[in-house]
Image (cartoon, rainbow, N blue to C red):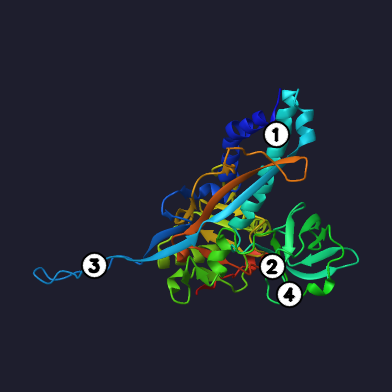
């Protein structure tokens, strides 16, 4: 007979390892390429010494002349707080009792709940991986009170069922009393979301309003865009440590091998960075495929960790990711990234070791996955970003595109 205890045992001993593997490797091809570590964690923080430049104790001299002065490699300390990542599943008491005498039905019940949890977690991990770390999903342009939809700058970061909040127009803050919204439908063609609240004050939405995941503002891991957009990185101001600024190319350019190679060459020359992954939008990836076809060149395919297959540029995998900003391409050296974690994914337990707990005043039980982690890039200036990529191809006979990389 299936009991609450046997359900807990299944979650602990059967499902946890599978879920952890799915979230660490299968969640996203970029995440699968990033190493994980439990080192350099002190209390709730990561403290990592990052090298600046090279050892200066090098010179050429006379046979009997003075030897070079020692000048060891300089270091700065990166400090980043571990972020709290949660995933929660819920089982009703009725569903649990209905399967208590049928082990197959019980397994199907747990399988379904775990698949839904993994699906939601994979979406949010992928979104955070390319985000700024501030939890922002999109800018909110307007609210249609009559039809109950919000018009957004983009809907790439939202999905049906997500619980969100809108920041205050006055100062961008969010309080616990601000209402939560459940996204019921995403109109991806018109960049709109329909919610379960139709009496929100329309005058509360305007220029400056932002959409956030519930309880997540400024609490997510520092993703790829955070390396480029945040003025402060790992406790250091970019204005004071200019070498923290990565390569950027912002002039509108047509996609071409020259555009990509110029960025790769500069990253290698300036930062001695070996780019091993290119991540862009699916539309830019398709555009590059058209570019290759226009020049009658073969499209090479490679397989990444986790079973992902993708095209390559000179042997470098090119990913098409929905969470990359429009008309943008990231050029990354994943060897510079580490996902620091206090521990792997674990079930949140109470003092008695229970993980399935009744929700107060409801006939339901919930279990929560937790991981304390932060993504850190040891060499931010070894990463590149090409934005403002044109949405059309230049005909081959007219292709004169150039890159305008700017080391900010």
Could you classify mark 3 by the number of other residues whose Cα lies within 10 Å: few (under 14), some (14-19), or many (20 or more)? few
Circle on res. 57: 3
CA distance separating discs 4 and 1: 42 Å
Q: Is residue 34 left or right of residue 292?
A: left
| Secondary structure of the residue carrying numbered label 3 | loop
Mark whose residue sits in front, 1 or 3: 1
- Circle 4 or circle 2, nearest the eye: 2
Quick one: label 2, few (<14), some, or many (20+) residues within 10 Å?
some
Q: Residue furthest left?
A: 64
Horizontal and vertical percent for residue 399? Answer: 61, 68
Task: Say above or below: 349 vs 199.
Answer: above
Sequence-wise first label, 1 or 3: 3
Instruction: Report the front residue among 402 and 305.
Output: 305
With respect to residue 62, does 93 lie above or below?
above
Sequence-wise, the earlier of marks 4 and 1 is 1
> Is residue 155 in sight in this rendering?
no
Q: Residue furthest right?
A: 146
Give how far across and how far down residue 271 sits, in percent. Answer: 41, 65
Q: Residue at 56% across / 58% down in the picture?
A: 221
Near mark 4 (Cα within 10 A), the count class, few <14, some 14-19 or many ≥20, is some
For the residues carrying marks 4 and 3, which lies nearer the camera in this image? 4
In the image, 188: left or right of 354?
A: right
Name the N-terminal-most of marks 4 and 3.
Answer: 3
Which residue in the protein does label 1 denote?
A: 110
Q: Which residue is mark 4?
A: 169
Horizontal and vertical percent for residue 36? 48, 48
Sequence-wise first label, 3 or 2: 3
Q: Nearer the viewer, residue 42 or 158?
A: 42
Separation of disc 2 and disc 1 at Cα? Answer: 35 Å
């Amino acid at each position: 007979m299936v009991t609450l205890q046997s359900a807990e045992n299944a979650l602990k001993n059967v499902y946890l390892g599978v879920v952890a593997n799915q979230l660490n490797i299968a969640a996203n091809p970029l995440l699968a390429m990033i190493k994980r570590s439990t080192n350099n964690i002190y209390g709730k923080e990561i403290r990592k010494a990052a090298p600046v430049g090279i050892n200066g104790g090098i010179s050429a001299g006379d046979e009997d002349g003075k030897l070079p002065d020692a000048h060891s490699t300089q270091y700065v300390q990166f400090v980043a707080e571990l972020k709290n990542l949660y995933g929660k599943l819920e089982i009703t008491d009725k569903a649990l009792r209905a399967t208590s005498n049928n082990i197959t039905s019980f397994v199907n019940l747990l399988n379904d709940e775990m698949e839904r949890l993994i699906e939601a977690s994979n979406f949010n991990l992928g979104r955070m991986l390319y985000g700024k770390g501030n939890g922002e999903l999109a800018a909110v342009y307007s609210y249609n009170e009559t039809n109950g939809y919000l018009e957004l700058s983009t809907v790439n970061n939202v999905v049906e069922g997500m619980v969100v909040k809108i920041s205050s127009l006055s100062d961008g803050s969010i309080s616990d009393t601000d209402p939560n919204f459940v996204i019921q439908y995403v109109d991806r063609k018109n960049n709109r979301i329909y919610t379960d609240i139709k009496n929100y004050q329309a005058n509360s939405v305007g220029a400056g309003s932002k959409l956030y995941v519930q309880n997540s503002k400024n609490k997510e891991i520092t993703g790829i865009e955070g390396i480029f957009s945040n003025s402060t990185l790992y406790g250091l101001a970019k204005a004071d440590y200019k070498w923290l600024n990565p390569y950027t190319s912002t002039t509108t350019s047509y996609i071409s091998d020259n555009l990509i190679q110029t960025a790769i060459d500069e990253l290698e020359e300036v930062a001695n960075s070996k780019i091993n992954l290119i991540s862009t939008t699916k539309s830019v990836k398709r555009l590059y495929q058209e570019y290759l076809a226009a020049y009658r060149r073969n499209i090479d395919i490679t397989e990444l960790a986790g079973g992902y297959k993708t095209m390559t540029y000179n042997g470098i995998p090119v990913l098409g990711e929905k969470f990359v900003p429009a008309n943008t391409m990231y050029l990354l050296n994943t060897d510079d990234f580490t996902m620091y974690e206090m521990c792997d994914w674990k079930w949140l337990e109470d003092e008695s070791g229970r993980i399935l707990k009744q929700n107060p005043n409801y006939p339901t039980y919930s279990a929560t996955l937790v991981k304390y982690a932060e993504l850190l890039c040891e060499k931010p200036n070894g990463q590149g970003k090409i934005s403002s990529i044109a949405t059309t191809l230049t005909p081959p006979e007219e292709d004169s595109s150039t890159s305008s990389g700017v080391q900010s």
